Structure formats: C-alpha cells, structure tokens
Amino acid sequence: MLIFPMKKLIGNDSLKGRSSLVQDLWVAAVINTLYWPSRPTECIKQVSWIPPDEYTVKANTDGSSLGNPGNGSSGLVCRNSDNMVVGVLAMGLGVVTNYEAECFAIVLAVETAVRQRWLKIWIKLDSSVAVLAFNGNQGPWQWRQRWRRAYKQL
C-alpha cells in the first residue's frame, strides 16, 4: 500500500474546506483504489457447512426474484466430500416468483448431476415449500417435465 502526503496529491488546495469523506474519496480515485469502511455488525451468527459423504456431491442452491413476481435467477455451487468446488452454475430466468426460482434451482442441480454423471447428489436449499413440492413429484408446471426426465436418469 502506498501512502502519499495529502498536500502533494491535492497540489493547489482544490479540496481545501471539503469534508474528510470527499478528500478520502478523491485520494482513493487518484491512486486508483477504493476503500469504504464498513459499519460494525450488530449480530454475529455462527454458520457451518457440512461436507457430503464420500462419492456424494452436495449442491447448495438458491433462487430469488426482485419482486414477487419479478426478474429472477437461480444458481448452485457443488462440492465433493473433499470440500472442492466441482461445479458452479447461475442462470437468469426472466419474470418468475421466488418459489419458481427456488424450484428451478433444484431442477438445475439434478440436470447438472446427470450431465456430470454424479451418482449421488445432496441438494440443499432454504425453501421448505419447494422441498415439499419436489418430494411429492410436483413443482411448477414450467419445469415439471425437465425435473421428471432428469430425476429418472439419476
């Protein structure tokens, strides 16, 4: 990290009388770096990630939309039992509901497992409604056929 005296960077006192925030941002722009101090967190939560068993791939999935319905996307990160990332996928879906985006993330995970020839996959997501739908072999009609086709190939 390089540190320059403020007077040398400003030169003609063009920022004299400005707030320290403006001066900091100007200096950051001059040296082509940007630092924005973060606010202290109010709540710290401990989280953990449990790796899958040997020969199993864990797919952590998520889907969301900006608005309900709104522009949405789904994605997944797949890791093996050695905690190595073996696949990452994200896809824009257009206008969907949050539920549809969550469900499509499940379909993406199963299709990815089939395409990669993974024998066992553990799909992890935060939507209990989507889990219930797929455990009952249901789900949004738009992706039900893709789900059934991929599920049969596992």
Image (spheres, helix red, strand yellow):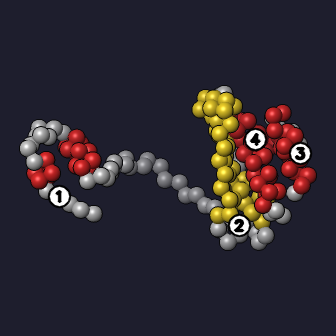
Please say whether residue 50 is visible from this viewpoint: no
- In the figure, is residue 13 to the left or right of 20? left
Amino acid on which the number 3 mark rests in the picture: Arg
Label of residue 80 in the image: 2
Q: Which residue is mark 1?
A: 4
148 versus 69 height, above or below: below
| Disc 3/disc 1 C-alpha distance (Å) | 63 Å
| Disc 1/disc 4 C-alpha distance (Å) | 53 Å
Where in the figure is residue 63, as x and y percent of width and height? 67, 42
Where in the figure is residue 31, as x and y percent of width and height? 26, 53
Q: Which residue is mark 3?
A: 148
Q: Do the residues under discs 1 and 4 have CB atoms within 8 angstroms?
A: no
Query: Mark 3 or mark 4: which comes first in sequence?
Result: 4
Query: Mark 3 or mark 1: which comes first in sequence?
Result: 1
Q: Which residue is mark 4?
A: 103
Amino acid on which the number 1 mark rests in the picture: Phe
Label of residue 41 in the image: none
Q: Do the residues under discs 2 and 4 have CB atoms within 8 angstroms?
A: no
For label 3, the SS is helix
For label 4, the SS is helix
Q: Nearer the viewer, residue 74 or 92?
A: 92
| Disc 3/disc 4 C-alpha distance (Å) | 13 Å
Name the residue rendered at 65%, 55% in the picture: 88
Where in the figure is residue 55, as x and y percent of width and height? 79, 70
Name the residue rendered at 64%, 68% in the picture: 84
| Disc 2/disc 4 C-alpha distance (Å) | 22 Å
Mark in the foreground, 2 or 1: 1
Name the residue rendered at 23%, 44% in the picture: 26
Count of numbered circles in the view: 4
Query: Mark 2 or mark 1: which comes first in sequence?
Result: 1
